[in-house]
Image: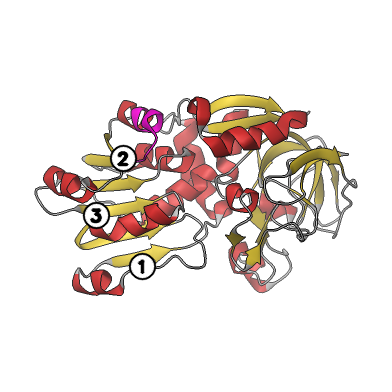
Amino acid sequence: MKALVFNGPRDIRYESYDDPELRSANSAILKVESCSICGSDLHMYHGAHIGKTEYNADTPRFCTGHEFIGEVVEAGPEVHGFKVGDKVLSAGGTGCGQCSVCKTGNPRKCRVSTAFGLSTGLQGGQAEFVNIPNADKTLMTMDGLTQEQGLLLTDGMATAYFGLTRADPKPGGTVAVVGLGPIGLIGVELAFLLGAAQVLAIDPVASRRAMAEKLGATALAPGPDLVSQVRDLTNGLGAESVFEASGASGAIASVLPLVASRGTCSFIGIPEPDDSLPLPLIMYKHVTVRGGICDVQNMWPHLVPLIQEGRIKAPDLFSHHFSLEDGSEAYRLFDSREDGVIKIKIDVG
C-alpha cells in the first residue's frame, strides 16, 4: 500500500509500506477514505517528544496519523459490532480489548493503550489501509455524520470537550481558551454552548483570532499586556476557567497568571519534558489544575447528539485539502501556519 511514513524529523514521505494484517481476533482492517493532521503530530514532525518517546533520525519508520475514517474491508471473528462494508470513524487510540479496563469501557487505562501513528506499536491511518485492534470499542458508525464531522470526532472535537469540561466552566462565567487551533476553536464554541457569558480567545495568529471573534469571543494576542487585559475584562479577577489547547511551552506558561483565585485550569496540549508549572501560584491562588489525555470513545455519547441537532457546527475548520501523495506538503503547510491554515483534510480513496 501507499502511506505517509515517518523517516525522521520534518521527513514525512509518501511511499510504499507493508499492507496491514489482522493482528488479533478482535481486529478489523479499514480502507481509509480520508484523514487529517493533528497538532500533536507536530511534536513528532519537529523531532521533539511525546511522552517518553523522542523522535529523531534513528526512530524506526512507521505510518503516521491518528485521525482517519473509512470502510471496513475485513473483520476478525471476535468483531461483533461492525461488518465488511460499514462506513466508520476510528478513535485516535485504543487498548487491547481483552483486559478488564478495556472490557469496562476504559481503554485509556489499558497498560498497552496507545495512539495510532506515533510508533511501530500501532501503525497510523495516513495510509490506504490500517489495522484496528479492539474494533468494537475503537470504531463508531458514520451514520448521520459528514466526513468532516467524522474526522473531528476521531480526536479533536472529543479532546476539546474533554479539556474544556475539565476546566469546570460555569453558566454565566468567563472562560479563557489559550491556543486557537482546531481544538481551541471548538473549545470556544463549546464554552458558549455550556453557558459561558464571556470567552477570551488567545493566540498569536491574527487569522485564528478573527475566527474566534466570529464565534463571539473576545480575541487577545499573547504578550506582556495579556494578564492586565484579562484582568480589565474580568473586573480584576481573572478567568474562572482556563483551557490550554496548544501544547506550546509559552502557552502552558501563560495559563496560571490568567486564572482567577480559586479558579480551574485544564491542560491538554502535549508538553515537552522541561515544561513545568509554578507551584506558588497554584498554592496561593487555590487553583485547581487538571491535565490528561482524552478517552475519545467516552466523549462520543456527549458530542454526537449535539452535532446531529446542529448545536455544534465547528465551521470552516478544514481550510485546506490535499491528496495523500501530497502529504509531505500538507505537513509543511500545517506546521508553517501560512495561508490561514487551520486544519487539513487529506483524501485517500
Residue 277's tag is 1
SS of the residue at dot 1?
A: loop
* For marks 1 and 3 on the same chain, the one whose residue lies earlier in the sequence: 3
Please, is residue 345 above or below residue 204 in the view? above
What residue range appears in magenta? 202-210
The reply to whether dot 1 and dot 3 touch (C-beta < 8 Å) is no
Towards the viewer: 322 or 198 = 322
- Residue type, label 2: Ala
Mark 2 to mark 1: distance in Å? 21 Å
Which residue is painted at 17% across and 44% down in the image?
229
- Within 10 Å of disc 3 (Cα), the crowding (few <14, some 14-19, many 20+) is many
Q: Which residue position is annotated with label 3?
A: 258
Q: Position of residue 70 (x, y in %)?
A: 73, 36
Q: Is residue 284 left or right of residue 279?
A: left
Numbered label tally? 3
Quadrant containing the N terminus is top right
Q: Which residue position is annotated with label 2?
A: 201
